[in-house]
Structures are given as structure tokens and as C-alpha cells.
Amino acid sequence: MLEEMRERVWRMNLELPKNNLVRMTSGNVSGRDQKTGYVVIKPSGVRYEDLKPSDMVVVDLKGRVIEGKLKPSVDTLTHLYIYRHREDVNGIVHTHSNYATSFAALGESIPVCLTAIADEFGGPIPVGEYAPIGEEEIGKEIIRSIGSSPAILMKNHGVFTIGPSPEAALKTAVMLEDVAKTVYLALLRGTPIQIPEEEVKRAHRRYKEKYGQTER
């Protein structure tokens, strides 16, 4: 079932350690199949180097396992809550990447002091309040606090990124850690200069409309 989506989600999960976003078995990627509404997600506690496409677990939006021999991620209920409340989201990534999570540990958002933040995120990367792991509380706080951003820092926890596909959510997670590192380094030397809000909007709009290749 959903062989293509399982392959895609598997490949995006393998990108997490490749991009130094996770250690050991932490973190996960999921993707929603728009036709069936089912979600494919990484199994719980399996090392990335041991993962196979067939290990990905298929669940419905209520969390019932539709197909898969392994237990789904402990973050599954968080993913499912987001999917149920955001029809535009079909991919989610969760990591504890070091630089971004250092801001989450302080309960601080990341300001727009780089053009890369304006382009990719369109505003500050928000921080959500602390929520306990295991049920739907994290998902509820993400929906409450993420706004129009494709990423959020969860206080005392880590990073969640969303997108129209697993690939888009993965790109956002990689970009977030990259800009978080730069801002972290800038803070060691002084106070980063924030970009004016109108310029942020202009840059983000231009990036969305003009960056990349036009499909024919």
C-alpha cells in the first residue's frame, strides 16, 4: 500500500542524519497521501541506517495502523492533529537540531535578520509554548502558534516544519537549522540587525513568485 509515498517518506527520513538534523533514532518525517488521506510515518525507535521503505507505517487520521509491522513514531498523534487541522499540509518534519533547538530551549523566536529568513519563512520563526509529549497537546499548540510560518520552535523541545509535501517540509527543516546557526553566531558578537517588515514581505513574495524553474 502507498509504495510511492513510503519510498518518498523513507528517503526524506534518511536526509535527516545526512543533514545533521538528528542523532541516533530521534526525529521523524511523515507524508499524507491526498487520495486516501492516509499518513505514512517513520517507525518508533529504529536507527536510520536500518530503515527500509517497507518499514514505514501507514496510519489513518485517527491513528489506527492500516499497514505496517512496526509501531509508528511516538510523535504520530502530533502529526495527525496538524494534518486534520491544516488541509494544505501534506508533509511534516520533526527534529531536535542543535542551533534551532537552542532558541527553543530559551523560549525565543528567531528574528528576520537575514534575507534567507525573509525569503524562506516570510517572517520571524515563532516559538510555541511548552506542551507534553505523547498525546495531541503539541499538535494543538503548533496549530495555535505557527500562523503562516512553515516552521515553529516548540519551547524546551525542538523543531517542527510543515509543507505541501514531505520534500518541502524537509527543505524547510534544513534551511531553518542553517539560518539558526548564523543567527546564533551573530548573537555571540552583538545584536543582529532586523530587516524592516515591508522589505520582508517584498522579499518573501519575490522568492515565492520567481525563485526556481518555471514548469512548462
Image: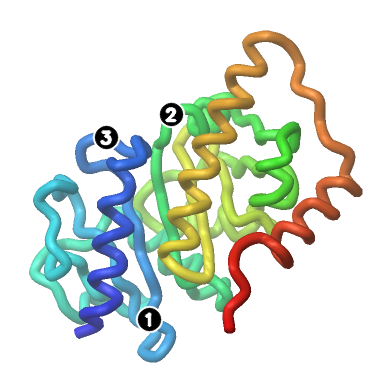
Residue 128 lies left or right of residue 37; in this view the side is right
Dot 2 and dot 3 residues touching (CB under 8 Å): no
Q: x%, y% of residue 194?
A: 81, 31
Give the vertical position of 211 relative to 106 (above or below): below
Question: Element type at marker 3?
Answer: loop
Question: Element type at marker 1?
Answer: loop
Mark 2 lies on residue? 98
At a point 57% along the width and 28% down the height, the residue shown is 103
Q: x%, y% of residue 155?
A: 54, 36
Give the vertical position of 37 relative to 109 (above or below): below
Q: x%, y% of residue 145?
A: 65, 52
Q: In which quarter of the image is residue 185?
A: top right
Give the vertical position of 172 relative to 109 (above or below): below
Give the vertical position of 100 relative to 143 (above or below): above
- The first of marks 2 and 1 along the sequence is 1
Residue 127 lies left or right of residue 20; in this view the side is right
Q: Distance between the residues labelled 1 and 3?
A: 27 Å
Identify the image quadrant of the C terminus: bottom right
- The first of marks 1 and 3 along the sequence is 3
Mark 1 lies on residue? 33
Q: In which quarter of the image is residue 72?
A: bottom left
